[in-house]
């Protein structure tokens, strides 16, 4: 039986067209872009083309504002550390949100051990960053504000332009982790007053191990890795040529197909959410009802635990992810759901379904067919369930 | 991640449910940690003639509950008190390391149920 993959936030398949464009750069056009000869030129041209495609995807003014990294995690590290180290004389105060990706949160924690003061902004019950708190927390020592474009676990889209305006009006700069959002919803770094923006290739259906950082002209950061001075001295290390070519192609496809695909995914998403809420008593949508990524559904089912739901769905050929971190390296529920104000047991009972290009209406129908029975079976096992819910 | 035995007990849990007129009930864990187990026992002539469970928790929590009831059924109270978390994990052909501590509570639940029975008997 075909497996239904609904875990696209964890990992996406590479688009076949992307793969095809990458292949020659492994064994035919394998030059080093730093070399002055034919092979070097060819590699350099390919990388520049990729830079242009990525700049276009996010509305950057110039392709030179894009540098390549090894992925979203490195882009977030480079943006935040690189900016903090370069600008610490102006201030030691950095503001971020409480629902950022761990590569932002742990980078900030790392900086707090080195004399930086970090504020983690609260979010409301839907995961929207509190603008009043932001305004209140900003001081003349604030050098950087880092807020994600959209959250990959609950799908909530942040009011980026409003945050950008506010941050700039107070004289700080603005970093945005757009890993989950890019390729799904339009991004315009100029209009939205973004100074630094992190991207990941795999989230665009490109290869893993590649990412990019947009650095607005005039934004000063310093490298966090020393070496041969590639990528304008900001990211040393020989360029991952096939990967970069792949990311560029993925960005190009995303730009061309995003509008239609977002519409399609939104329909699938909304049918699925409605079905779940209608068919399963005491099930709730986590995150914002409308300001959410087209592909992301996070739902919670009272009285049961996420990992046993994942295992049960997996037995029926449906693959998804858990709000419960019981499946991950720690047993704590994810910080994102707790930041929404959910209780531990509610966070433990949450499931994350992320749709992708290959998913269809039939997939949604199938999952809606099996999920109510799975929830029912696990609830029958649960000592927490109130008597009236057991028929 | 889990052994085939764990998955078997997760898929087809043995002795799932409540015993309405249980002689002893043991409750361990808490929903905050993501695991809560109730073990119900029925005792006759010092022997566990029936053992059932209800569990909120991950795959390991459900499988260890199921395995514990299977190990305990038919045992004398003394024998059942000697069943350890290690015995349960071993009978399931092992558990992932991270699950050994938090989700492997069912033996404790069984012991709590027996103590509950003994306490009630005294009264």
Image (spheres, coloured by chain):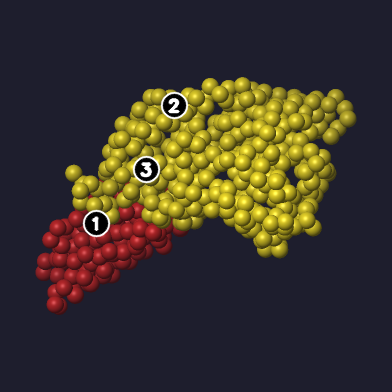
Chain colours: A yellow, B red
Relative to B21, does residue A65 appear above or below in the rendering?
A: above
Which quarter shows the N terminus of chain A? Answer: top left
Residue B53: mark? 1
Q: Is residue B105 above or below residue A100?
A: below
Q: Quadrant of residue A6?
A: top left
Q: Which mark is residue A284?
A: 3
What SS does tag 3 mark?
A: strand
Tell me the quarter of the picture where residue A376 sits: top left
Res. A246 in view: no
Q: Crowding near pointer 3: few (<14 within 10 Å), some, many (20+)?
A: some
Q: Given the current orientation, which residue lies at the most extreme bottom position? A: B122
Q: Residue at x 51, y 40 (%)?
A: A156
Q: CA distance from mark 1 to mark 2?
A: 41 Å
- The image position of residue A276, as x and y in percent, is 34, 36
Lateral position of residue A67 relative to residue A286, left or right: right
Looking at the rendered image, the disc whose residue lies closer to the viewer, 1 or 2, is 2
Q: Position of residue B2 (x, y in %)?
A: 41, 49
Viewer-proximal residue among A222 and B41: A222
Q: Where is mark 2, residue-wise?
A: A267
Question: Chain under label 2?
Answer: A
Foreground disc of the pair 3, 1 = 3
Q: Between residues A238 and A102, which one lies in front from this camera angle? A: A102
Quarter occupied by the C terminus of chain A: top left
* Neighbourhood count class around disc 2 (C-alpha, 10 Å): few under 14, some 14–19, many 20 upward: some
């Amino acid at each position: 039986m075909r497996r239904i993959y609904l875990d696209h936030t964890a990992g996406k398949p590479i688009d076949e067209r992307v793969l095809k464009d990458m292949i020659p750069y492994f064994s035919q056009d394998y030059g080093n872009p730093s070399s002055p000869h034919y092979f070097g030129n060819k590699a350099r041209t390919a990388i520049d083309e990729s830079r242009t495609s990525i700049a276009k995807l996010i509305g950057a003014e110039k392709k030179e504002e894009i540098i390549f990294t090894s992925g979203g995690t490195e882009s977030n590290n480079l943006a935040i550390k690189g900016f903090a180290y370069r600008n610490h004389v102006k201030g030691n105060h950095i503001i971020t949100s409480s629902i950022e990706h761990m590569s932002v949160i742990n980078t900030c924690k790392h900086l707090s051990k080195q004399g930086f003061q970090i504020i983690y902004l609260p979010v409301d019950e839907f995961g929207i960053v509190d603008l009043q708190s932001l305004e209140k927390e900003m001081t003349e020592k604030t050098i950087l504000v880092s807020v994600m474009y959209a959250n990959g676990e609950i799908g909530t889209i942040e009011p980026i332009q409003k945050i950008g305006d506010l941050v700039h009006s107070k004289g700080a700069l603005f970093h945005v982790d757009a890993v989950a959002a890019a390729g799904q919803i339009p991004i315009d770094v100029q209009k939205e007053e973004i100074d630094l923006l992190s991207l990941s290739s795999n989230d665009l259906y490109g290869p893993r191990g590649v990412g990019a950082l947009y650095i607005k002209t005039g934004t000063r950061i310093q490298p966090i890795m020393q070496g041969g001075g590639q990528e304008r001295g900001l990211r040393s290390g020989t360029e991952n040529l096939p990967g970069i070519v792949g990311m560029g192609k993925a960005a190009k496809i995303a730009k061309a197909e995003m509008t239609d695909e977002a519409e399609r995914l939104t329909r699938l998403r909304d049918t699925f959410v409605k079905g779940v809420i209608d068919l399963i008593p005491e099930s709730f949508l986590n995150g914002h009802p409308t300001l959410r990524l087209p592909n992301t559904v996070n739902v919670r089912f009272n009285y049961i635990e996420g990992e046993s739901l994942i295992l049960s769905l997996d037995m029926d050929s449906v693959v998804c992810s858990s709000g419960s971190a019981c499946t991950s390296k720690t047993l704590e529920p994810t910080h994102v759901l707790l930041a929404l104000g959910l209780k531990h047991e509610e966070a433990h009972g949450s499931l994350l379904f992320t749709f992708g290009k290959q998913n269809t209406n039939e997939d949604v129908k199938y999952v809606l067919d099996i999920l109510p029975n799975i929830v029912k079976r696990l609830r029958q096992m649960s000592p927490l369930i109130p008597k009236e819910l057991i028929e | 991640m889990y052994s085939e035995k764990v998955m078997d007990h997760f898929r087809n849990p043995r002795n799932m449910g409540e015993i309405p007129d249980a002689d002893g009930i043991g409750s361990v864990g808490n929903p905050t940690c993501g695991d809560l187990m109730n073990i119900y026992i029925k005792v006759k002539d010092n022997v566990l003639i029936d053992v059932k469970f209800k569990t909120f928790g991950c795959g390991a929590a459900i499988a260890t509950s199921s395995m514990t009831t299977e190990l305990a059924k038919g045992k004398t109270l003394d024998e059942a008190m000697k069943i350890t978390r290690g015995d349960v994990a071993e009978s399931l052909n092992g558990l992932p390391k991270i699950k050994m501590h938090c989700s492997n509570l069912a033996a404790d639940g069984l012991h709590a149920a027996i103590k509950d029975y003994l306490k009630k008997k005294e009264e």
